[in-house]
Image: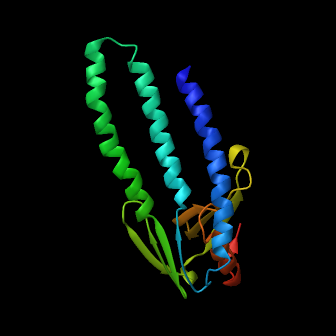
Amino acid sequence: MRVFFVLIIAGIISSIIFLIARKKARKIEKIMDANDFVIRQPKVSLILYIVIAILVLIVFIGTFLSLDNKDFIIILIFLPVYFIVFGPFFIIIWFRWKMIIKNKQITFTSYFGKKKSFTFDYITIVKHSIGKGNYKGIEYMTAYHENKKLFSFSSICPGFQVLFQRIKNEGIVIL
């Protein structure tokens, strides 16, 4: 029952955070140069990662407080490992993911540091969709070269609309 309650809270918090992120992204995009800009995950996504980690911690603590002393000691050993592993992981993936657009050149860096460089001419199709449910109003964009996925991200990222408009101006097919 506690896990279900935590999932509901996480859903509500993520909806609020995505709404805030979208509004901030549109504000930042007003000053972006369409020929030279960087797209990153919004700072509120890092906050979301932290909130989820804390909610998971609360579930663990609540579950294991009801256990006997031997199991509780195991959990006390597990908790520092949890924060040592997941804390830096969330921060690293937040900093690593980015897309740099300079004139016609696009350089995309994935969560794990893998870089892909290509030009707008290399993109053959862009799939555009709008989220449903809790993600209603959030736009998603996935770019492909033939059937190979190049990158994908959502409108909570500052620069989404600038890149989308640039893709339209370049004459790339949008589905």
Looking at the rendered structure, the number of numbered marks drawn on it comes to 0
| Residue at (62% x, 50% y) in the render | 17
Against 83, residue 77 (above or below) is above
Q: Judge by depth and name the residue closer to the eye, 20 or 144.
A: 20
Residue 172, visible in the rendered structure: no
Q: Judge by depth and name the residue closer to the eye, 113 or 64.
A: 64
The image position of residue 31, as x and y in percent, is 64, 80
Residue 17 placement, left or right of 150: right
The image position of residue 172, as x and y in percent, is 66, 78
Against 79, residue 134 (above or below) is below
| Residue at (60% x, 75% y) in the render | 124
- Report the quarter where the C terminus lies: bottom right
Residue 38 placement, left or right of 28: left
The image position of residue 167, as x and y in percent, is 65, 78
Residue 9 placement, left or right of 72: right
Q: Judge by depth and name the residue closer to the eye, 134 or 65.
A: 65
